[in-house]
Amino acid sequence: MKHLILIIITIFPLFSFSSCDDPAGPVGQGYDRKAMLEFTAKNTIIPLYGDLYQAVKSFDSTLHSFSENQNEQNVQELRNSWRNMTEAWQYVVFFDFGPAQMSDGSLFQNIGTFPASALKIESYINLKDTSFKNYDRDSRGLYALEYLIFKDSASIIQSIKDQPFKLAYAKAVSRNILTRVESVFNQWQGAYGTAFIKNDGAQAGSSISDLYNAFVFHFEVMKNYNLGLPMGKRAGQVNSEPSKVEGYYSGYSTALLKAKYTALRHLWFGYARLSLASSLSANGFKDYILSVENGTRLAQDTELQWNVIGTSLSTIDVQVPLHSHIIGQSPQLEQIFLEMTKHTRFIKSEMSSLLGISITYASGDGD
Amino acid sequence: MNRIKHFLHVPASASTLAYFRMGLGTLILISTLRFIFLGWIDIQYIQPKFHFPYFGLEFFSAPSTSLIYTTFVILIVSSIGVILGYRFRMMSLLMFISFSYIELWDVSFYLNHYYAVSLFALILCILPAHVTASLDVNIGRIKESITVPYWTHFILFFQIGIIYVYAGIAKINADWLFSALPLKIWLPAHASLPVIGPLLALEFTAYIFSWFGMLYDLIIIAFLINARTRYYAFVTVVIFHSITGLLFQIGVFPIVMIFMATLFFDSSIHQNIIQRFFPKGIQQSQEITTNLPKYGIVLLCIYVIFQLLFPLRYALYPGNHQWTEQGYRFGWRVMLTEKSGIALFKITDRNSRRTGFVNNAEWLSAHQEKQMSFQPDMILAFAHFLHDEYQKQGIHDPIVTVDCWVTMNGRPSSRLIDPKVDLSKVRDDSYHKTWIASYPGAIQ
């Protein structure tokens, strides 16, 4: 044993000091994940859920005003209100963990599933069934509402006259969304918000792992489902399927795509809600990456690619619906898809690798 | 030859083998129950739509659900049988076969320590580990003996030594020693741990751990064998494996290695422990020395030579083996590199030339996708699967190409696979895979 101790004491410091001039540079002093989580919860997640909650409440009351007083002006207000609500949704869609994981699926599954199924919505309306006790989540989210209030572009007033239960169904869907969003918002303001900040490890189930995994998952959703599937990029598709975009009936799809991109980008940069207009400095994944080995290079590469995607997105007209861009085989759209694909190597593979964030619980052990 | 023969037949304690038998059986039983209670049968073996076969052993991959459960039942029953020493020959064989069979289902769950457990289970099959402290003795199925020939101990010590020494040799590379990679990436992720957390954030610590880890693996076996140092060495073993167990998600591996280190203890300690469970043993005991037949010695030599050479086969392949992973498995390269990748498969109809991209998550679990994305043979296997699947969906003889980018030890991603190669037409074999892109760095 004396030999062993002697060896350890003499050899290790010797080697260690001799290798301090490593070109890879110093390791960060241990990133303060708790501070990042606290910043994110207080300045990003909770205010953004607050925005959504207000927007949903406002939609719900607009819907009630409309039902009291069915005129064209109220139709326009209802549609505007839906646009606001759905845009606010883009900024929280990826916080789909913690209280957003409900007993019957996540908030995203329950209110954000797209495209909505006209067939199922009509069928539940015919059955006068608003129980929502089924797995047809494409019949009751934000995009079911969209179908109901945008589908008959000429006159939804007439269509409700023809089928009065439509209005009751819309109210039930709206109420369902409101209840869920309110519950998630309240839990974030209460015990879950505190628990989220405290759970500051990097293992599966830690807050940083939840946040990161949801971020990557929804980037993939944006790439594969907002764009890939409607564009006909998926293996096995014979044609493009433009009607599968998010926000098809409202024609608001291009705006929603841009909002989702901005929201994901803001999360990576660690911007507080509206931070660009406020004095709060950012604290998020970018700072975390900068604190680790080889992080400076990755942060630069990632930032550059965010900008490339942003630039390519700015080339498509937000007023023109995504499905029109797809039908017109817009080369700009091809470029956006390509750049988003390229981005996955930074945010999916290199980022998880450098930060040492576990991807899943169920992955089994390593060796 | 005679000296070797004599060396192999020196009488040694049968208690050590009984202790090994009970310990290994218990470890396998516990890890199997843990596996079941974590719900991993369903997640790892039933849910995925595709399983990655071992090259040449495709037949054993992706069994039916009933066969999966049957195998687990056999494994549990046989491990209990092994612990008790009841019908030991049959039970140990069943334990080895069922445990190893499970490992062959899906290569994405390959772990060095599962391979180690498989080898120990195989060795157990040929050891007279039931000649004392077993039900077989107690019910009179076999005669008790307090001694066994020394080769039965030697083969265990040899196997443990192989694992450590090769793990140590693998660490002798520039990244590990001179850049403290990947530990410089892995350790700071645990900076929030109490007490030791702040230390883990220091660059210095990553170097200490890298060098200590390498030296520990290379020399610990010598200190365990030496009677004067073995108990101190054991303390080091416990500390080392506890720390790695705390920092990395490596399951039962630390316990397995700590247990293996106790085999080097004086056999009186093993005897004391096993007598608690089989108090009746060691009464009318006798010394039975069965001579190993000639073919036994030959087989033993073959096993030893195989274990010495097989981990080195990577040297037969060109390129950086940490990058290409050719000849990488079954080589005790444990927790050696940080790798991660993305693999975007493109499917092209050979007639119409219409292309589409695969969403891997539609076919693979998160774990499978992660493992596949940086291992060329798995990428190839998945490409073949995709070819057949999309052919079924009506695409004519799909051309399957992949845009695969891998990051190793925190360096910028580079292409792992030639993106022009139609993988559906590439057959897997044991030769060098020319479609693997070479590693841009010069790190070896």
Image: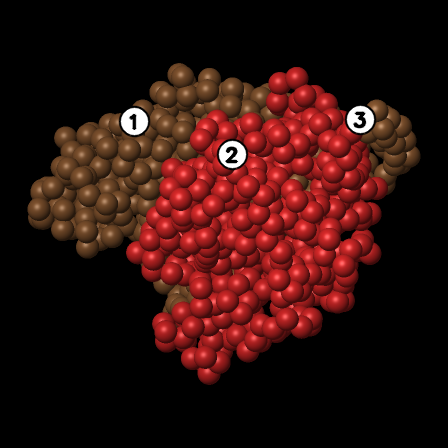
Chain colours: A brown, B red
Mark whose residue sits in front, 2 or 3: 2
CB-based contact (under 8 Å), mark 2 and mark 3: no
Number of residues whose C-alpha sits closer than 10 Å to that of mark 2, classed few (under 14), some (14–19) or many (20 or more): some
Name the residue tied to disc 1.
A57
Q: Quadrant of the N terminus of chain A?
A: top right
Depth order, front residue of B147/A59: B147
Q: Amino acid at mark 3?
A: Met
Residue A144 coordinates in the image, percent (x, y):
25, 45
Query: What residue did someone put label 2 on?
Result: B282
Q: Residue shown at 69%/61% (left/top)?
A: B301
In front: B366, or B329? B329
Residue B292 pos. (x, y %): 62, 58
Q: Which residue is mark 3?
A: A1
User: Residue at image x 43%, y 73%?
Assistant: B388
User: Which numbered tag is attached to residue B232?
Assistant: none
Say which element carries label 3.
loop
Observer-nearest residue: B358 or A223? Answer: B358
Q: In this image, A10 relative to B199: left or right?
A: right
As measured in the structure, the alpha-carbon distance from the residue carrying label 3 to the one carrying label 1 is 72 Å
Identify the residue at image location x=56%, y=27%: B272
